[in-house]
Amino acid sequence: MKNFLKILFLIFVIILLYFLAWPVDIEPVAYTPPPNPGLKGVFEKNDQLKSTKKLLVGKGIGPEGIAISADSFLYTGYADGRIVKFSMDGNQVSEFAKTDGRPLGMQFDSSGNLIVADEYLGLLSINPQGKVEVLTDQVDGTKIFFADDLDIASDGVIYFTDASQRNHNIEKEIWELQPTGRLISYNPSTKETKVELPSLLFANGVAFSPDGDYLLVNETMGMVINKFWLKGTKKGTKEIFVKELPGYPDNITFSKGIFWLAMPTIRDNQQFEDMYEKPFVRKIVKRLPASMLKIEEAPPHGIIIGIDLAGNIVHNFQDTTGEFHHLTSAIEFDGKLYLGSLEMDAAGVFNLNQ
């Protein structure tokens, strides 16, 4: 009996040591998440996005970002590196370029070049003939690891995000919550690349104010929208623009007094958020069998919100059925929102005037 108890105790010690000390492939840090307002109030559930028309069905996976050219054609990039050009109704589609990376956020500059944040290659410029040029892929002696979204200032300076310096695996990024994301600027005239704002929790969408005195930059894993001042007495400082969101902010664009924000998923895993402030607990949990570790994803849920210049939520468009889901961008043109998605095999167009 004594030997049995000794063996039992030894097994217990081994198991305890395993859960407390066995090496894991994450280095989590503590983070206090902002309040989750849930899908109520200004974020009340609705199905207005169900009227969205699908475009580019079956043309590729993940039309994440969308840009509009001066001749009113749309451009988007796919997971396989292709960038396609298509008409407003989606009936005319042609391949424009291929980056051999993962094109994400994109926008045309004043010379008609398509500027692209490519997850693997950095900041790109693609001329009207489809020739790809790397503008910058390093800053301060470090590689731009995960170029994500961008906006272009009136003077031509490009501001873009480097989402993370650690992970391309989004799930691992959630486990770690390390604030290694950055807002970076690139000046085409001087070729200078500069870190403007470090220590962001998965830096993502970027959008200038109408006067260019500040820009908004999203922290997807931080679940907040920051205002970063570029002019005036607050120049170089950051403040929170919106801190209570029901989902994870992705790309953001500005048009006619409204910032349009896409959120690919909603926040519905409170148990996991409760561990955000407890990195040691996350390391213990990470030692569980792999079959038990998959972070449960929120059910597919489309959500686009409109925010005014004061930070008020003034539009709330959702699709609770999940027909339109993992929405990552919304860009307004001629009374319509053109929608991109990280995982769908289609883009979408939503009529704002219906």
Image (cartoon, helix red, strand yellow):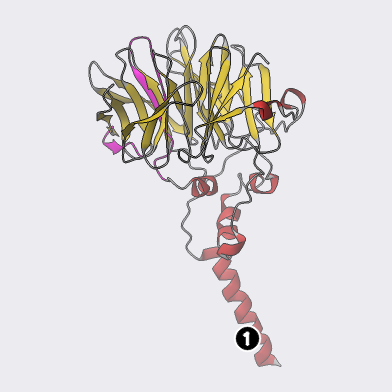
For the C terminus, the image quarter is top right
Res. 97 in view: yes
Residue at 33% from the left image edge and 36% from the top image edge: 144
Q: Give the range drawn in magenta.
A: 139-166
Q: What secondary structure is marked by label 1? A: helix
Residue farthest to the front, as pictured = 91
Q: Is residue 129 left or right of residue 287?
A: left
Asked if residue 151 lies in the magenta stretch, the reply is: yes
Residue 179's place in the image compared with 123, above or below, is below
Q: Nearer the viewer, residue 211 or 92?
A: 92
Which corner quadrant of the image does residue 70 belong to?
A: top left
Asked if residue 326 lies in the magenta stretch, the reply is: no
Image coordinates for residue 298, horizontal then vertical, percent: 65, 44
Q: Nearer the viewer, residue 187 or 130?
A: 130
Query: Which residue in the protein does label 1 denote?
Result: 7
For the N terminus, the image quarter is bottom right
Residue at 47% from the left image edge and 34% from the top image edge: 63
Residue at 28% from the left image edge and 34% from the top image edge: 137
Image coordinates for residue 277, horizontal then vertical, percent: 61, 44
Number of labels in the image equals: 1
Residue at 70% from the left image edge and 25% from the top image edge: 48
Image coordinates for residue 237, horizontal then vertical, percent: 47, 18
Residue 318's place in the image compared with 253, above or below, is below
Q: Is residue 52 left or right of residue 26?
A: right
Image coordinates for residue 126, horizontal then vertical, percent: 29, 26
Q: Which of 175 and 258 is in front in this view?
A: 258
Residue 344's place in the image compared with 211, above or below, is below
Q: In this view, does 211 lie to the left or right of 17?
A: left
The amino acid on which the numbered mark 1 sits, given as a three-letter code, is Ile
Label 1 crowding class (10 Å Cα cut-off): few <14, some 14-19, many 20+?
few
Res. 147 in view: no
